[in-house]
Image (spheres, helix red, strand yellow):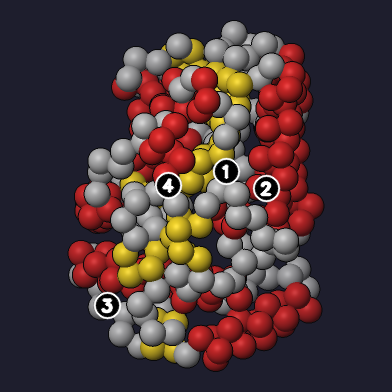
């Protein structure tokens, strides 16, 4: 099978492209600069540079491939709606149109469980539980992108979407690096009682889920799937495990949730008024994520994708820590 992986310069896209190559798939990748994907090129990936915002490039990328794994997109908790819309919705539109024009058989779309989070505790959240109002631009535009993907099903494109929660492992450049930096600066504190449960996903388990989505048939098609390790843990226990492995002091200071939320509200308000609207050090959404339970029901993925998480979170965290120690600076 020949596939296209978008977003291959990112953590998830890059790890899946490598995984696919190791499984013997022919892999085409896209990024703006060859340096960002040099290890994948060295492993045999076909590289086509450019910006997916260009519909002609998207069409060229989708030529003579059987399936697309679309991992590219805008992430974050701060910024203009227009930028998130472009990065998540417009790019996905271009990929969908290119798949249809080039007669690609299947599109596997990397979405996000942030769609379902609205600042309150959630336990065993199903894929169908969508809030009436989204918490941020990221969640809203990821949902709109999903709708673009599933809208193409009526034109014959086989589509699936995955919503993995807090993906980590060797190469993680988002979840734990930010927490580590905050702790080094003395800005990290346990918000609330510190007992809130969180779901994480080993990137190796996500790779297996993406491969299953590429190979799935029949009733598995046309669905969105929650993906996690299926074993929720107290968030702050996990954070402190990583800090101890990296020989950093664990987080012990507590801040009451109302106080942290009020401070985040003030921080965001001030930043909106400043020239250039700089990114706040503290976000209301971030405070809620760090204080509230948020776990996913992965029963649908178990049933239709035969998804069985095999790599434990502790193994993924050990891999992350080992690589982090080897990274200069």
> Within 10 angstroms of label 1, few (less than 14), some, or many (20 or more) residues?
many
**Residue indicated by mark 2:** 143
Mark 2 vs 3: CB contact within 8 A: no
Who comes first in sequence, dot 2 or dot 3? Answer: 2
Mark 1 vs 2: CB contact within 8 A: yes
Total residue callouts:
4
Q: Which one is in front in this view, the residue at disc 1 or the one at disc 4?
A: 4
Is residue 35 visible in the rendered image? The answer is no
Residue 5 position within the rendered picture, expressed as x and y whole percent measured from the top left:
52, 27
The disc placed on residue 250 is: 3
Q: CA distance from mark 1 to mark 2?
A: 8 Å
Compared with 77, 153 (above or below) is above
Left or right: 35 as drawn, with respect to 306: right
Residue under the point 31% across and 56% down: 231
Q: Which one is in front in this view, the residue at disc 2 or the one at disc 3?
A: 2
Who comes first in sequence, dot 1 or dot 4? Answer: 1
> Within 10 angstroms of label 4, few (less than 14), some, or many (20 or more) residues?
many
Q: Residue furthest top?
A: 64
Residue 165 position within the rendered picture, expressed as x and y whole percent measured from the top left:
45, 52
**Residue indicated by mark 1:** 111
Q: Quadrant of residue 286?
A: bottom right
Mark 4 vs 3: CB contact within 8 A: no
Q: CA distance from mark 4 to mark 2?
A: 18 Å
> Within 10 angstroms of label 3, few (less than 14), some, or many (20 or more) residues?
some
Who comes first in sequence, dot 4 or dot 2? Answer: 2
| Label 2 residue SS | helix
Q: CA distance from mark 4 to mark 3?
A: 31 Å
Q: CA distance from mark 1 to mark 4?
A: 15 Å
**Residue indicated by mark 4:** 298
Is residue 205 visible in the rendered image? The answer is yes
């Amino acid at each position: 099978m020949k596939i296209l992986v978008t977003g291959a310069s990112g953590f998830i896209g890059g790890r899946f492209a490598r995984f696919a190559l190791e499984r013997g798939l022919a892999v085409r990748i896209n990024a703006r600069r060859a340096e960002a994907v040099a290890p994948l090129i060295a492993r045999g990936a076909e590289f086509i540079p450019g910006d997916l915002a260009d519909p002609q490039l998207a069409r060229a990328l989708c030529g003579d491939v059987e399936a697309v794994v679309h991992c590219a997109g805008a992430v974050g908790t701060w910024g203009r709606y227009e930028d998130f819309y472009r990065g998540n919705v417009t790019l996905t539109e271009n990929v969908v149109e290119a798949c249809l024009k080039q007669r690609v058989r299947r599109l596997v779309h990397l979405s996000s469980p942030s769609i379902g989070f609205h600042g309150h505790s959630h336990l065993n959240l199903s894929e169908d539980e969508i809030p009436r109002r989204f918490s941020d631009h990221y969640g809203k535009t990821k949902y709109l992108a999903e709708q673009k993907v599933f809208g193409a099903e009526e034109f014959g494109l086989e589509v699936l979407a995955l919503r993995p929660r807090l993906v980590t492992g060797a190469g993680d450049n988002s979840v734990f690096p930010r927490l580590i930096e905050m702790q080094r600066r003395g800005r990290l504190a346990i918000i609330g009682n510190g007992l809130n449960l969180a779901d994480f996903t080993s990137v190796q388990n996500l790779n297996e889920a993406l491969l299953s989505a590429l190979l799935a048939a029949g009733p598995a098609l046309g669905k969105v799937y929650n993906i996690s390790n299926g074993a929720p843990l107290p968030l702050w226990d996990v954070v402190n495990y990583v800090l101890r492995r990296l020989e950093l002091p664990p987080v012990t200071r507590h801040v009451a949730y109302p106080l942290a939320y009020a401070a985040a509200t003030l921080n965001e308000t001030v930043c909106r008024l400043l020239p250039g609207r700089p990114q706040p050090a503290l976000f209301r959404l971030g405070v809620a994520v760090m204080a509230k339970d948020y776990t996913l029901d992965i029963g649908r993925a178990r049933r239709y994708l035969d998804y069985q998480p095999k790599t434990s979170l502790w193994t993924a965290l050990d891999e992350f820590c080992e690589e982090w120690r080897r990274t200069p600076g």
